[in-house]
Amino acid sequence: MGYLDNTSTTVDAILTKKGRELLARGGDEFKITKFALGDDEIDYSLWDVTHPNGTNSYGSAIENLPMLEAFPDENQIMRYKLVTMPKGTSKMPILEMPIPSTGLTYSSAGQSQAISPNTKNGSDAQLGYTIILHNSDAADLTVASGGEVVTGGATTPVFLSDAERKKSISVIGKTFSLVARSTTVKIVTQITVIGNETGAVTTVPITVNANA
Amino acid sequence: MAEIFTRFDSAQDVVSNLRQTVSSGMWSGGTGTLTTFFTSSTQSSSNGQYYYDMYKTDPASDSTAEIQFSVAFGDRNGSGSLGQTGNYPSKAIYAQYRNLLLTPGDSKFTFGGSVDSDRIYVLTMGRARLREKMDPGNWELHLSGSVGITVGNQLSHTGSFVKLIDDSGATTNPTVNAGGRVFNIVSGSIATGTAVTKTAAASNPGGGLGLFYPDLGIIVLNGDTVSVSGSITMGSGSGTNGNNAGAMYNAIKRGEYFVSRREEQLSTTHYFCRATNQKFNFSNNPTFFTASDGSLTNASFKNDPKAYITTVGLYNDTNELLAVAKLSKPILKSFSREAIVKVKLDY
């Protein structure tokens, strides 16, 4: 006879930088209304169906992994989220972009490209997409007319370097317009698109040639 | 339909604004007892006429030494300090604390037994040490006129020696004035775990030993009585530098004992994050599926997917990540498992 396993786990939360900012600002912005679960550090290739100890040990490599403490930078944590989907689902939502996989190349300033992400194996029709342009010197990114969604400035869970973060812009919508800016040097950057309901992510390289 | 966020049911999942009092040792490193005391020659040479900063370790040899508290001397008429007429540091100090702690129009500190005093020693706790307030009934300061001698495990003093505590344990309804709550300082000890008062403030010869303002972290000692009890030579001549803050520093240093706790009110909210069996069984972790068509990378996950919870993110309505909690080990989630993670958020 042993002790029963506790069914709940208690953990201490820390405020993110954004949380501290909104708490200091007062008002209703610091109002926690929902949660999401993440598995940032997990590599599912460690799930070992050939483990000699049997099914109970398939996940032992994952379960024995020491966990890192929480980072207060909201952009560096909760990058990969657990998703609720129907049983029997065999394919995860992925984002399709109606542009070449090699990316977009602009040769002149003012050149425009419509971006209309599509979620395959799922839908982001209600909350739309968060799209991040890593270097706003390269282009102007706006939500296309009619492509707006009713939501605010979601946290963008994507790795950006300090230099990129100073220059990045993010917008939320369903369809977008990317217009090349005038530049004297060739700029190579990328856009990251995130489905706000499914959490699906994709990136597309962007090149803006010198002037352009 | 895919979902990554789950809304809290505020009636069932959120227990909000639990007020909790947390106390801890007040000195550097969270320790409650201070037995060594140092000053900084840099600080004392520039404004030692007004106050001395007190350190736990010697700032001359320890670059990480932190200020624990400050000691100042005030005289209502400016005695015991050098200066030009009307501009005496000791007078400025007395006026500063009078303005801060007494009600307008009250020109003198009045101690136990309704005795006024023109001379005060003031101990002001460092902001970083105090945080919110001092814990009444949980501090004790020793002042000594002689250096202690250790006999066995006991430190003893041959000359004048006094142990100071506050009388909050015997006060059910403390006085509240411009400086917040005020308690008398009495001779006694808290070494046994409860306050044992030797002499009540009103009965102390010459008047009470001092006043304690826990909400501000300030201890005001009656210069006239404490200098006798602690054998502190008070320089009170007019137009002479009595170095009285330095004399108090020496008495504290010889006493070798200042124990104190601080107190904070924390607001805690508990969030119950319920991952029921039907929820959170898939992941958009790039190792969970192939990038080309979204197929699950592990064939055995097709009818029985397994995901691991390592992190809980708390969001507002605009999907901004406000707080985050990490689990100590990954929790397995599948259609045959449920998990409840209780997230505690203090602020």
Image (spheres, helix red, strand yellow):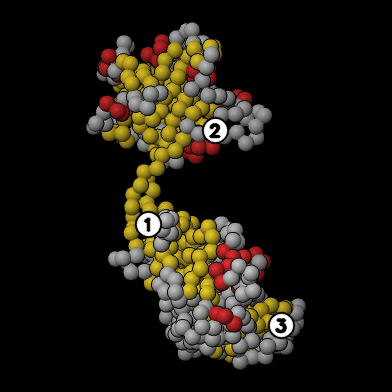
Q: Residue at x 45, y 9 (%)?
A: B160
Q: Secondary structure at mark 2?
A: strand
Q: Chain of mark 2?
A: B
Rendering quarter of residue A209:
bottom right
Please say if B297 is above or below B156: below
Ranked by sequence position, the earlier of labels 2 and 1 is 2
Q: Report x, y in % for residue B297.
A: 61, 81
Q: Chain of mark 3?
A: A
Residue picked out by circle 1: B269
Q: Residue at x 33, y 58 (%)?
A: B16
Mark 3: which amino acid? Thr
Structural distance between the alpha carbons of marks 2 and 3: 55 Å
Is residue A59 found left or right of B177 in the rendered image?
right
Q: Secondary structure at mark 1?
A: strand
* Comparing labels 3 and 1, the label whose residue is closer to the camera: 1
Residue picked out by circle 3: A207
**Number of residues whose C-alpha sits closer than 10 Å to that of mark 1, classed few (under 14), some (14–19) or many (20 or more):** some
Residue B87 visible (yes or no): no
* Comparing labels 2 and 1, the label whose residue is closer to the camera: 1
Residue B67 badge = 2
Q: Report x, y in % for residue B265.
A: 37, 45
- Do discs 3 and 1 belong to a common subunit? no
Instruction: Residue lying at the far front in this picture: please name it.
Output: A1
Residue B260 badge = none
**Number of residues whose C-alpha sits closer than 10 Å to that of mark 2, classed few (under 14), some (14–19) or many (20 or more):** many
- Depth check, front residue: B342 or B139: B342
Q: Residue at x 62, y 36 (%)?
A: B64
Please say if B147 is above or below B221: above
Q: Secondary structure at mark 3?
A: strand
Structural distance between the alpha carbons of marks 3 and 1: 47 Å
